[in-house]
Image (tube, grey):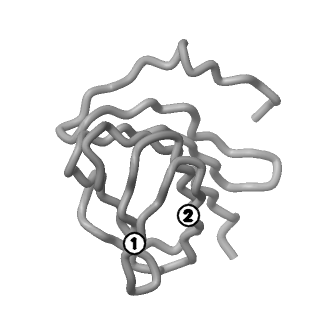
Amino acid sequence: MQSIIYDWNRITPEPTKTGHKRPFFRTPTSTLELLTCHVTTLNPGEAPHEPHRHPEEEMIILKEGTLDALHDGRTQPMSPGSVLLIASNDLHGVRNAGETPATYYVIKWFTPAR
């Protein structure tokens, strides 16, 4: 991966059954097995999928709207600009709790296998 700007206006949204998704990148880096970033926009009342777990950490940054975020056994509201850091194997999920679309960045990093 090289230094690059991913321009919001040049990344075409892909429709999903709950809103849409913009795929920014999914690539190895010089220090990570894989680094991924996409942006999801959820329609009001929607969740992208059921709560789940995975071994890699994940970060969700809310751009606009309101989310209810499940993490560490509890659900808490997120307002624009909030960051949710999800620990390895923590049960987690989000749902749009507002009356307008909610848009958020999802960043995941995968370390080399040990």
Q: Measured from the top left, where is residue 49 in percent x and y? A: 25, 57
What is the three-letter code of the residue carrying label 1?
A: His
Q: Residue at x 30, y 70 (%)?
A: 51
Q: Are marks 1 and 2 in contact (CB under 8 Å)?
A: yes
Q: Secondary structure at mark 1?
A: loop
Q: Measured from the top left, where is residue 65 in percent x and y? A: 41, 43
Relative to residue 113, is residue 12 drawn left or right? left
Q: Is residue 79 above or below residue 55?
A: above
Circle on res. 41: none
Q: Measured from the top left, where is residue 29 in percent x and y? A: 75, 45
Q: Residue at x 53, y 55 (%)?
A: 60
The residue carrying mark 1 is 92
Residue at the farthest bottom position = 73
What is the three-letter code of the residue carrying label 2?
A: Leu
Q: Secondary structure at mark 2?
A: strand
Q: Local crowd at mark 2 within 10 Å, few (<14), some, or many (≥20)?
A: some
How far separated are the C-alphas under marks 1 and 2?
10 Å
The residue carrying mark 2 is 84
